[in-house]
Amino acid sequence: MHIGTFPTAGALLLAPAVNRLHQQGVHISLTEGELPLLLRGLRARELDAALVFSQPGDRLDLDEDFEAHPLLSDPLLLVMPEDHPCASLDQVSLGDLRDTAWVGAADPHDPCDRVLAWACGQEGYEPLHVMRTDDYAVVQGLVAADTGVALVPRLALGPHRPDLAVRPLASPALAREISVAVLRSTSAGPAQELIAALGEQAALIAERWASARIEPAMRLYANSL
């Protein structure tokens, strides 16, 4: 079975599901790439299944030969230096960041950059990007050095850093809606096992995220899993 995944979903969401299928004797090959590559692979029938996502202003475009099974809502969180003026807030409005510098993806058409542009557009301005990189560890290092702020998926957050503050956005709240897209002609057998395993792992992640919300202004990091 040939499965596609985007990088931030591979470790926490996909890996346990792949291990479960391996134990059942299913041969798995992986293709890792960003969303456009995965969608092309699905449409070309080069992938039997892929982890994909939609987000506000950027819907998932799949043809009728595929079925998408929702898995997890992955919040897009604001990452700031720990002494940023908005770090004292429980939630941050994009309207308060009108004159703020941003660290974005290397590709200006990256999905996170597109949703940020869409959300800032709802507030009447365009975000100013001063640095770009595809490495979320580098993003967080640049933010800690006060280069700018960043929008980071919760799945992509690394170990807790005391020099960073992480807050949800107030309005609009942004999230990636992660699904597994499966070619209908391969929806039996291993594909159903994959869907079930991914669903169970997604439920565990969502449960752990929910149980981690102890304080309103807590720092939200993936190592709370």
Image: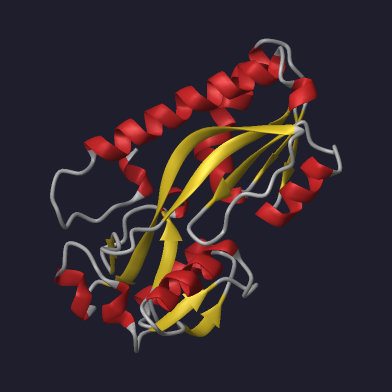
161, above or below 155, in the image: below
Furthest residue in direction front, as rendered: 64
Name the residue: 30% across, 63% down: 169
Residue that appears at 34% across and 89% down: 99
x and y percentages locating residue 69 in the rendered image: 57, 31
Residue 173, given in percent of the width and then of the height, sits at 33, 58
- Foreground residue among 14 and 66: 66
The one of 36 and 79 positioned closer to us in this rendering: 36
Q: Looking at the picture, does residue 172 appear above or below residue 40? A: below
Res 83 seen here: no
Q: Quadrant of residue 217?
A: bottom left
Identify the image quadrant of the N terminus.
Answer: top right
In this orientation, does residue 23 appear? Answer: yes
Which residue lies most toward the bottom here? 99
Residue 22 falls in which quadrant of the image? top right
Depth check: 15 or 115 in front? 115
Q: Residue at x 49, y 74 (%)?
A: 117
At which x and y percent is residue 132?
56, 77
Left or right: 63 as drawn, with respect to 5? right
Does 126 appear above or below 111? below
Q: How many marks?
A: 0
Q: Quadrant of the C terminus?
A: top left
**Residue 26 vs residue 222: left or right?**
right
Displayed quadrant of residue 211: top left
Q: Residue at x 45, y 38 (%)?
A: 72
Residue 128: give x, y in percent of width and height: 47, 86
